[in-house]
Amino acid sequence: MNIPALDAALAAAAAWIAIGLAGTLAPRSLRLSSRVLFPAGALVGLALAAVALGALFAAPSVRILPLGLPDLPFHARLDALSAFFLLLLGSVSAGVSVFASGYLRAGETSPPGLQCLGYHLFLASMALVLLADDAYFFMVAWETMALSSFFLVTSEHRDPAIRRAGFLYLLIAHLGAISILLCFGALQGGSGDYTFETMRLMTQPPAWASAAFLLALVGFGAKAGIVPLHVWLPEAHPAAPSPVSALMSAVMLKTAVYGLLRVTLDLIGFSLWWWGVVVLAVGLVSALFGIVFAAVQSDMKRLLAYSSIENIGLVMAGFGLTLLFRSFGMGTLAALALTATLYHCLNHGFYKSLLFLATGSVLHATRERSLGRLGGLIHRMPWVAWCALVGTIAIAGLPPLNGFVSEWLLLQAFLFTPGLPQAYLNMLVPVAAAVVALAAALSGYVMVKFFGVVFLGRAREPKLASAHDAGPWERTGLAWLAAGCIALGLMPATVIGMLDPVTRSFTGTGMASLTHGWLYLAPIEPQRASYSPLLFFVGAALLIVVAWLSVRAFYHGRVRRAAPWDCGFPFLDSRMQDTAEGFGQPVRHVFQPAFRASTEAPAPADARPRYRETLEDRLWYWLYLPVARATARATALVTVLQRGRISVYLMYSFATLLVLLFFVR
Amino acid sequence: MLQHYGPQLINLCAAVLLLLGFAMLTQRRILSLINLFATQGLVLCASTALVALLTGQHHLWGSALLTLALKVVGLPWILHRLIRRLNVKWDVETLLNIPTTMLVGIVLVILAFNLAAPISRLAGTVTSATLGIALASVLLSFLMMITRSKAVPQVIGFLAMENGLFFAATSAVYGMPMVVELGIALDVLVAALILGIFVFEIRERFDSLDTRHLEKLKEH
Amino acid sequence: MSTSGLAAQFTELVLAILLAPVLTGWVNQCRAWLQNKSAPSLFLPYRMLAKLFEKEVVLAHNASPLFRFAPYLVFGCLALAAAIVPTLGTDLPLNAAADAIALVGLLALARLFIALAGMDIGTAFGTLGARREMLVGFLAEPALLMVLFTASLISHSTSLATIVETLAHREFVIYPSMAFAGVAFTMVSLAENARIPVDNPATHLELTMIHEAMILEYSGRHLAMMEWAASLKLFVYSCMGLALFFPFGVAGGGDWLGIVLALPALLAKLALGGAGLALIETVSAKMRIFRAPEFLGSAFVFAVLAMLVHVLLEA
């Protein structure tokens, strides 16, 4: 039963391409795209997820496709790692596609048919990246992914800010792609054969392996959005339409993580301890940076984009620990860290897409992206609000939902580290655990800000009174993702059973053999650490219900409605509640050195005082602008060659001809 | 029983010493700084007495008494009188803000622990692991001297540094010879005297105790 | 899971829910004695709760279902937390369900819902309280987690029962890292329970409130649940402190006599702890809200130092 799984996966990718092309048949028809094609895409996603689930427990299968160049056919492979990420892709994209069916509108800048094409090409290329088994196929799929997402990001291309965001995105994606190409070049080690199978069997000398690793980190890291290669993320994710932002944040960033895992764990094979330290450091810096910036944003989609940077940072921290343990041969602990990393990828896929889709509904209902003009939407849009609450609790890493499980696993991995042979590492690890705890606590803060300012309180603008709740398609998509969050949170042992083949193939041990029963999550042994979300949830629910029933039984249930407490000041209006900037001000105060702030304050005698504060990313000024200026200078030097006269150009050709004649003589 | 609990109590004293060093770093009020310094002296005296009890080196009892007299009673009394005359009881400004200072402090503690680890393996005493903590205290008080801009906290930082050195000596090599010890104590007293005069001179000249005013004495 | 464990679990839960207001009353009494005032009755909090339950609930026009549901949810979370912390015995059935990290997560869940409830009505006071509470929370939560990690590193486990067993029943060892952890834990408890020097529980001025500002809109039985939950939180933190730093007297598994003897030991320790808290509150002054991050930052740093000292001195 091996071959059909891979064929089924390839067929799913082909089906997506077909659906996309079908969209171009009637580009302006909204009915075709939203009622037929997108739901079909969702079904394909579900099928892909089912196939991947089965393939997780099977042996790897390989196939050579009759596509590609005559000497370089495409190789495809489905093993446990690919199957896991395909499962993520399929299940998340199903929910997002269903949402998108209800989200598409006529009259936007891009016709629905073209959006359908871009969207399904994006999905198909991500699936092909996960299935690729040679560098050529990988790069073709990678580039298709970048290009299709570029066109999706710039769907509203009449807005110059969106065009600029798209350009930045494409630029950094290509810088990353160059780095990945060089990495594959380093891995093929002079054999000229770019298939992954050859790279797998070859053992690299440590210097080349380190070079390949660093190139992979830069290349895949640029796509994943680690600091300092993150600048495109807060621009591109808000610029794209919400289903696309959801897919990009939830799935595309994970394909970059997949690429890094594939290169480091599978193609290179061994790990050095300093690789782990580098990845851990990069991860921690990204996590803290991302969440601190998220706390001060006024645009809800930018806030979620920075939060994605934080979550990728946590994934990288887990991966760094895996490499560290692996290099010292501590198999069980490496398996624990890898399980935490992969679980967090899956969790983030679900709750981030849920939150982005919720912002999409809000955007459609209110046409507002700025947090300063929203508020009180729980009354007008209850369905969206309650699903967003599930997403908020999940992303804040609170029990009993899924975010807590992956954080729990990650913190457990940190706690076992005093067994490391090096004293320096033993001392740095408590500090690293502290940073992870700080990032997790800050994400709780940021999500209270997000949910509280958007959905709670009073409406800050009068037009919000006409906001309507999401339609049936949108509700289905949101409910699917929320159910995913709840299921992943309450059944961690089952999910770890699914992750078992992946960790077993790379670290030799799997966690499933060490969990005790399906009810408890006890990675090493129950006395050491044990958590049961189901019991936890049942216990809490029981206590809450008993409390409520007792109060109702013994006391009356009278309620009277009145105006809120105004401390004697009768002119309270909705503008007097906290703004987004106000809620983020404590973080801005505590983490002041991290921001480059510019303030415009009014003079004392101003008749119409204006106050403006801009918070910018320091890295833009320290890294990107100097590099851009240096590039501009270098190109200015080269433009000396451009004279504009034909005789000069003919002279260049002539001179080259003479030089070649001399040398080939 | 003393053999069993003695080293643990000394470790505890070491930890409390480090705790007090960090607390001094984060304090804003000069009055609390002096009180913390006095408490540090008390802990130092207790640990010296413990080492004397454990190892039977009788000259350490004299050290302990000297520490008690000087660092718990004498110097704090002088400092209290000084700040009353100078009228500087309240908030202290720092060059770096307090959270950043604490972060730098943690980095210094990690560095100190790692530097001292190989040395403490060589020393054969009962309390060799505390060398790292003593080194960390010294570095932390140095940091305090650097990041404060008023004169009196800098003086206290200097005195706290000597505390750390004394603790390093008692824990690693069972105390210094009495002569060396008296010499150091005299040095510290003289330094405190000079610093006291220095403090008054600054106040005379600049009408403030902010040592940043000394920059005005540059050539250009 | 033995019957003694089940009995201990149930007794702990009921004891926590019933005794929490008495602990608050005791702290208020000690504080009044220290300040030379005549003390209120020890059972005054019960009378306050009874009065509040009898009253009618006054809800703002734009209160959402979240606002109405939050008091019960917060109370339930804190009751579960009280059931997890081992106070009478260590053989608790719920131990396998939640460990130290889950306990911190549970407290964070309660805090999240109080903050959201504060933001629900949309007045300036509620959002002010929510913002300040999250400010205190985002620094206090990692500090608490690090304190529990220090204990976990010592006992090689994050399960609270194992931690208490190790610290109570192994031979008595002085752990210097626990000195740091103790200071950090005290600072965190003061901040999280809205005590001086971080917040004044008896203030009437809205601009100086943190916890009170969030529950300003609650009345009647909802306010009673919130107040009860707040005293439960103080009880949980006190029991956590006792379990980590003074665990002597907590019974081991299957020891009926030990469980019975643990009760007076617990009451005595809580009485001393409450008196200590009153002492700290009396000699400190409430600090400016923007000194609170420095205060909690030092707690965080001390907790990290505790782990470093453990790695250096005890590993």
Image (tube, coloured by chain):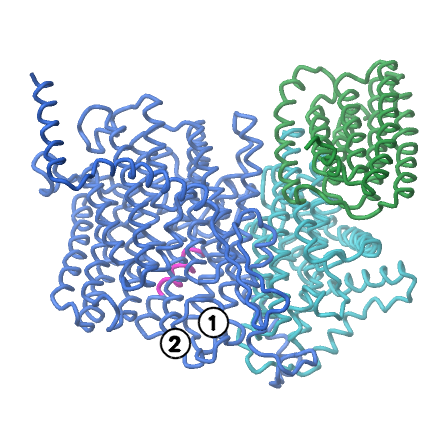
Chain colours: A blue, B green, C cyan
Element assignment for label 1: helix
Residue A469: assigned label: 2
Element assignment for label 2: loop
State which quadrant residue A327 falls in.
top left
* Residue at x 60%, y 57% (from the top left corner): A586
With respect to residue A659, does A106 lie above or below?
below
Residue C174 visible to the viewer: no
- Name the amino acid type tagged 1: Arg
* Residue A107 position in % (x across, y down): 24, 73
Q: Nearer the viewer, residue A497 or B33?
A: B33
Q: Which residue is mark 1?
A: A373
Name the subunit of mark 2: A
The CA span between labels 2 and 1 is 17 Å
Residue C45 visible to the viewer: yes
* Residue A79 position in % (x across, y down): 26, 41
Give the overall secondary structure of the magenta segment: helix
| Label 1: how many Cα within 10 Å (few below 14, some 14–19, many 20+) | many
Position of B214 with respect to A307 (left or right) is right
| Label 2: how many Cα within 10 Å (few below 14, some 14–19, many 20+) | many
* Residue A22 position in % (x across, y down): 13, 63
Give the residues drawn in magenta, as a range.
A480-489
Position of A648 with respect to B3 (left or right) is left
- Name the amino acid type tagged 2: Asp
Question: Tag 1 or tag 2, which sits nearer the N-term?
Answer: 1
Q: Nearer the viewer, residue C210 or A418?
A: C210
* Residue at x 64%, y 48% (from the top left corner): C144
Residue A482 counted in the magenta span: yes
Residue C25: assigned label: none
